[in-house]
Amino acid sequence: MPKNKPNKGLLKRIRVTKSGRIKMSRAYGRHLRSHKSASLLRKYRIPKYASSSDAGRIRSMLFTKVKSQKQSRAEETPPAAE
């Protein structure tokens, strides 16, 4: 049986963190910047994390275990004590 090969174009655009979240840069921040406000351009520099629907598609392209932003937040927050 042949090995599964990850999508090389996708690997150049994302990073998988130690916790398994997918970190990527935001769209619309590279070209045609002159009409965009400085605050908007600063927001484009903040990294984005993949949603659960994107994480499923990325998982199938990379053949690895990844988590969505929602899943990782659920693990970080401790359960409410009663």
Image: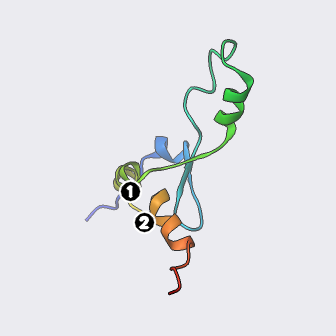
Q: Is residue 59 left or right of residue 81?
A: left
61 horizontally vs 12: left or right: left
Residue 67, visible in the rendered structure? no
The quadrant of the image that shows the N terminus is bottom left
Please give the label number shown on residue 35: none
Residue 59: numbered disc = 1
Mark 1 crowdedness (10 Å alpha carbons): few <14, some 14-19, many ≥20: some
- Dot 2 alpha-carbon crowd within 10 angstroms: few under 14, some 14 to 19, many 20 or more: few
Q: Residue furthest left?
A: 1
Q: Would you identify the image quadrant in which residue 44 lies?
A: top right
- Label 1 to label 2, Cα distance in Å? 6 Å
Q: Quick check: 17 above or below 42?
A: below
What amino acid is at disc 1? Answer: Arg
Q: Residue at x 49, y 57 (%)?
A: 69
Residue at 59 percent across and 67 percent down: it is 18
Is the residue 62 above or below the residue 73 in the image?
above
